[in-house]
């Protein structure tokens, strides 16, 4: 049976990229992206709009470039795939996350500048996400 796992998103960064390194020394950057939904009119005649938020993970040289040049509010086009990860916390609770593993990140014109200071650390919407281990998580 054939399967396809491909995601293409165009939006704006919700936070500055955070650069870390795997135990093997490979760079990994993570950032949030906000993507506007296509507006529609519901059954009551009300216009409905919305925004979806995603976490993007980028590897290798592209991770370093992303960290160096992108900031909160920057426009990006991300081409990649979805990855599901799960783990157990130190207190025994099960956690999971679905993230976009970017294979290509295109820088777009800025959607707006933010006057706020960047967050101290990304937090995956309040969930403590463990580091990605070595090369087994590489998407290619």
Image (cartoon, rainbow, N blue to C red):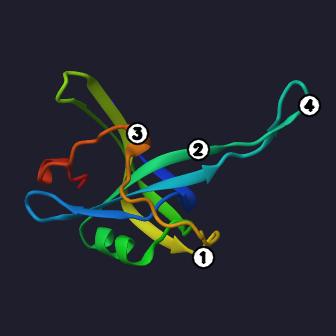
Task: Single out the mark in the foreground, 1 or 3.
Answer: 3
Badges 1 and 4: C-beta atoms under 8 Å apart? no
Q: CA distance from mark 1 to mark 4?
A: 34 Å
Badges 2 and 1: C-beta atoms under 8 Å apart? no
Quadrant location of the C terminus? Answer: bottom left
Q: Earlier in the sequence, mark 4 or mark 2?
A: 4
Q: Is residue 23 visible?
A: yes
Residue occupying image coordinates x 69% and y 42% = 50
Would residue 78 be found to the left or right of residue 99 on screen?
right
Q: Which residue is mark 4?
A: 45
Q: Quadrant of residue 31?
A: bottom left
Q: Position of residue 134 (x, y in %)?
A: 12, 53
Residue occupying image coordinates x 45% and y 72% = 70
User: Where residue 109 is drawn, which disc sits there?
Assistant: 1
Q: Earlier in the sequence, mark 1 or mark 3?
A: 1
Q: Looking at the image, how many numbered discs can be counted on the residues?
A: 4
Q: Which residue is mark 2?
A: 52
């Amino acid at each position: 049976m054939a399967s396809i796992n491909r995601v293409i998103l165009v939006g704006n960064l919700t936070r500055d990229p955070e650069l870390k390194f795997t135990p093997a020394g490979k760079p990994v950057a993570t950032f949030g992206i906000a993507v506007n939904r296509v507006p529609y009119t519901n059954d009551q005649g009300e216009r409905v709009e919305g925004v979806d938020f995603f976490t993007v993970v980028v590897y290798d040289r592209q991770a370093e470039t992303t960290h160096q040049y992108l900031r909160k509010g920057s426009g990006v086009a991300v081409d990649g795939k979805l990855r599901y990860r799960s783990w157990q916390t130190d207190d025994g609770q099960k956690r999971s996350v679905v993230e976009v593993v970017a294979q290509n990140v295109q820088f777009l014109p800025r959607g707006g500048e933010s006057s706020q200071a960047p967050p101290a650390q990304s937090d995956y919407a309040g969930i403590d996400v463990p580091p990605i281990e070595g090369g087994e998580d590489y998407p290619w």
